[in-house]
Amino acid sequence: MPHLTFRVGWAGARIGGDVDIRSDIADGGDAIMSERRQLINRAYRLLGSFSEAEDAVQEAYARWYAMPAGQQSGIASPGAWLTTVAGRICLDLLGSARARRERYVGDWVPEPLPDAAEWSGGDPADRVTLDESVSMAFLVVLEQLTPAERVAFVLHDVFCHSFGEVAEIVGRTPAACRQLASSARRRIRAARTPADPVARQADLVRDFKRAWEARDIGALVGLLDPTVTAVADGGGRVDTVLGPIEGGEQVARYAVRIADWVPAMTILERTVNGRPGLVAERDGVVITVMAFDVADGRIRRIWAVRNPDKLRPWTGRTR
């Protein structure tokens, strides 16, 4: 499998524009803080959690500012240093994530992100650039990798780090990191199917919305793959079904029941992680964000995130 086509550069080129990051300490804090958006972008792809990405980047900066000025001045590239430290923090977090998610109430789904124009509150510099590498389907596949595989694959194939640079983060040899990335590519290729064009996805999601609002079970079934799976993430914070719902008829009937349970719900078409999705509001407050996996003209998977802790970018709520 060739490297994926969404390479976006690493320390010298940030997502959203090519900016040469120099190590001139005379630039002071501005030069250091200018790395923040790139670090957030990397950390979100590594962790699948925006809140954890923020924490990882904050910890990396805390370690930087805890160093004596003399030690800082001896670092040739502060950007590369921050990237290495943040990557190691993310690797540690991934190592403990599986144990934490075993205690999670219900299914764990990556945190959904809105389009930049829809982002509510927060620092604009922290907003994640949306591309293929943050689609919900892709992030879910990344969850199947080992922590080391995920770090090696994301940093090399998505952000173009050399395997020597990845080795500094993972703590293995460049050759071992090459093998990790290769293993990750094989597993990703086996788990993924080509998605329909975005315009076709948008049409199907729009049709799903209309059929859902009309409570038309037959129309919903027609839009769903017979083996469709729907997963809801409430995290124990709100009521939701525990475990996946499988099969077109079952998913369609459950969707209609939700519409009956929450008659005041408004359903809006929105971009979710760079792909067509839906947002449910009640009294003007976002209560659910839905992402879809569309292939071969049918909806194959639905992820409904209801945990309010994962909806901060949609609501403007702070921690």
Image: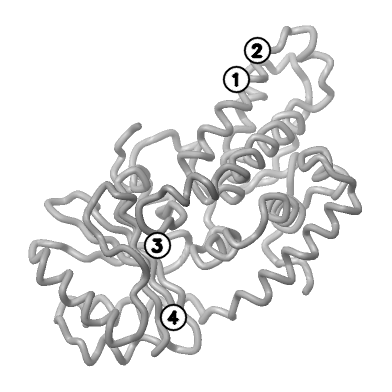
Amino acid type, label 4: Arg
Counting from the top left corner in percent of width and height, residue 117 is at 39, 50
Amino acid type, label 3: Thr
Pointer 1 local density, CA inside 10 Å: few below 14, some 14–19, many at least 20? few
* Mark closest to the chain's N terminus, 1 or 4: 1
Pointer 3 local density, CA inside 10 Å: few below 14, some 14–19, many at least 20? many
Which residue lies at the image location 75% right of the left edge and 52% below the top edge? 152
Q: Total number of numbered labels?
A: 4
Tag nearer the camera, 3 or 4: 4
* Mark closest to the chain's N terminus, 2 or 3: 2
* Mark closest to the chain's N terminus, 3 or 4: 3
Q: Which mark is residue 300?
A: 4
Q: What SS does tag 4 mark?
A: strand
Pointer 4 local density, CA inside 10 Å: few below 14, some 14–19, many at least 20? many
Q: What SS does tag 1 mark?
A: helix
Disc 1 + disc 2, Cβ < 8 Å: yes
